[in-house]
Image (tube, rainbow, N blue to C red):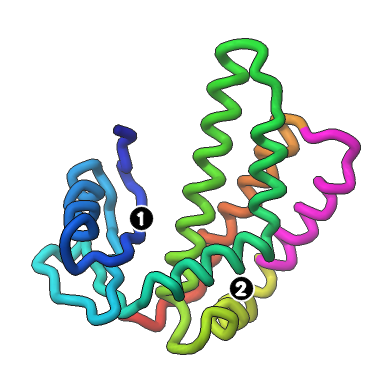
Amino acid sequence: MPALEGSVVLVTGANGGLGTEFVRQALDRGATKVYATARNPRDWEDARIVPLGLDVTETAAIYFNLGGRLQIARLRDQIVALPRDDRWNTMARGALRDDLYAAHAALVCDVLKATGPGTPEQRLAEWAERNSDAVARTSRTLTEIWETERSTLATLSVAVRSVRSLVASGAPSVHS
């Protein structure tokens, strides 16, 4: 199982069963913070666990809408198409793909914690407005990369870094 050292994790359905177990395992594997979502979130004794009232369908809507806006699938497809002609290229390709997935998940967490109540579309619009400079910068970078003739490990690394920079630029949380 991969380590989650220093990661921020989002768990849906965290009130019981597998959800509760996922929260515990994320912390055991090194996550620094876990957003534990449920329709009616419960209190947790561990300060690293942040309960959020959220339905799994809302989380999924934000995940897929954000992925569409940032063309995550296109980026993933370009990464998957990178050569696997030796061990190091295969490992680099896998690491880049994993970094993309982690950045996408972290962005969803950022949208959830930095926005108030509303539909997924409203929350994404609020998040994009709060982070307009970073979103515009990332959009320019991705557009430039898409206009290149071929994707390389270098261009795709820059693309993933650009997406990841959106997490670092996140606006202050409305959930204290």
Nearest-to-viewer mark from 1 and 2: 1
Closest to the observer, 1 or 115:
1
Check if residue 141 falls in the magenta segment. yes
Read off the residue under disc 2.
131
Going from N to C along the chain, the mark reached first, 1 or 2, is: 1
Position of residue 107 measured from the top left corner of the image (x, y, whole percent)? 51, 62
Up/down of 85 relative to 67, above or below? above
Front-most of residues 57 and 69: 57
Does residue 143 show up magenta in the picture?
yes
Cα separation, mark 1 vs mark 2, equals 19 Å
What's the magenta region?
135-151
**Could you classify mark 1 by the number of other residues whose Cα lies within 10 Å: few (under 14), some (14-19), or many (20 or more)?**
many
Residue behind mark 1? 8
Location of the N terminus (image quadrant): top left
Q: Quadrant of residue 154?
A: top right
- Type of the residue with mark 2: Asn
C-beta proximity under 8 Å, tags 1 and 2: no
Q: Nearer the viewer, residue 150 or 159?
A: 150
**Image vertical order of residue 30 relative to residue 46, above or below:** above
Prevalent SS, magenta region = helix
Q: Position of residue 164 (x, y in %)?
A: 56, 52
